Image (cartoon, coloured by chain):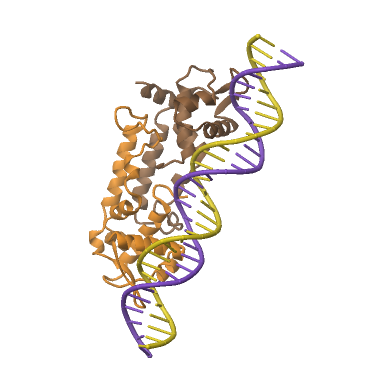
Chain colours: A orange, B brown, C yellow, D purple
DNA sequence: TTAATTTCAGAGTAAAATATCCGAAACTAT
DNA sequence: ATAGTTTCGGATATTTTACTCTGAAATTAA
């Protein structure tokens, strides 16, 4: 089902993008996220906790509590989320699964895949999530 | 671990590329493939059977038996293998996992991802597996 | 201070992906 | 014919990923 990123990573991207649409500092509960996005409650909760632990989100318990971005959405890139959840695997692993590929020996599509990876990286850093959230609102 | 294609698909690509290095018509056993490539015996066997069922390989039982490409490696593309095993998911699914993305509404990186997908497609069709196998031999 | 609402932490379950086993059928060579 | 070697088909097992449950701790407001 998922293409390039893990399921938790996809959910994290969706959630962060949702939070980026809120006014700065406003708290959003896991409950709201689960109803607006189509993500199981306990699962998104875990992911949000994880992002909080990694300092990308800020959280607060109690009523009026919830989650918010830890810093301005203008200063957060897609790449920050992706690397927090999935690490850098997509950058290092051979697209054909050859374990040797990368050093001395290299697979048959290594160079082409390298270019594509650069494009992907570019996609992840070229816009901040504030701009992205704004785009999606239309 | 795997980046873009499923594990079985990665294995299939490796196996087919190995077969493409053989002279036309020569049979190769699952046993040989499992020892040359780093793929579990029973698993690669299944994948080869699957590719045989899908007419990409030809097979024969008994000693001297094994698997061979069903047609000339000059007429087989990477895309043929990928679509046989994984289908077209990477072409249709949203990279952020939004189920609505694609029709009316569209996600924040839809256009960029579309370009990348075109690059990937290009990578899968620009060379046939005969050329690829030749390259990798050096 | 109590009840309600939220996140937190850790364990548990379910489903999907990956890998294995086994007995049968097909083929080859002796 | 028979023994050896291979693929075939279907079931099973294992591992990883996705998802859930439960009880506790923090916060808020009445």
Query: Is B112 situated left or right of C2 in this image?
Result: left
- Which quadrant does the N terminus of chain B fall into? top left
- Report if residue A99 is visible in the image: yes
User: In this rendering, is residue B20 above or below B45?
Assistant: above
Rendered image quadrant of residue A106: top left
Instruction: Kindly tell me whether residue A136 is visible in this rendering.
Output: no
Towards the viewer: B29 or A53: A53
Q: Position of residue A72 (x, y in %)?
A: 23, 64
In the rendered structure, the answer to whether residue B90 lies left or right of residue B68 reads: left
Q: In which quarter of the image is the C terminus of chain B?
A: top left
Question: Hey, which quadrant is residue B70 in on the image?
Answer: top right
Closer to us: B51 or A112: B51
Q: Position of residue A54 (x, y in %)?
A: 29, 59
| Viewer-proximal residue among B54 and A28 | A28
Q: In this view, does B34 lie to the left or right of B106?
A: right
**Percent coordinates x, y for residue C6 in the rendering:** 38, 73
Count of marks placed on residues: 0
Picture layout, residue B95 above or below residue B46: below
Residue located at (40% from left, 67% from top): A33
The spot of residue D17 in percent (x, y) is 45, 50
Write down the quadrant of residue B63 in the picture: top right
């Amino acid at each position: 089902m998922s293409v390039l990123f893990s399921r938790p990573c996809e959910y994290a991207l969706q959630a962060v993008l949702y939070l980026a649409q809120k006014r700065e500092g406003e708290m959003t509960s896991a409950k709201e996220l689960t109803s607006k996005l189509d993500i199981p409650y306990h699962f998104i909760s875990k992911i949000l906790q994880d992002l909080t632990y990694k300092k990308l989100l800020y959280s607060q318990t109690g009523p009026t509590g919830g989650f918010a971005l830890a810093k301005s959405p203008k200063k957060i890139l897609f790449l920050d989320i992706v690397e927090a959840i999935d690490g850098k695997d997509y950058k290092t692993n051979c697209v054909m699964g050859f374990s040797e590929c990368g050093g001395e020996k290299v697979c048959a599509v290594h160079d082409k895949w390298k270019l594509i990876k650069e494009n992907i990286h570019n996609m992840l850093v070229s816009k901040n999530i504030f701009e992205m959230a704004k785009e999606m609102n239309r």
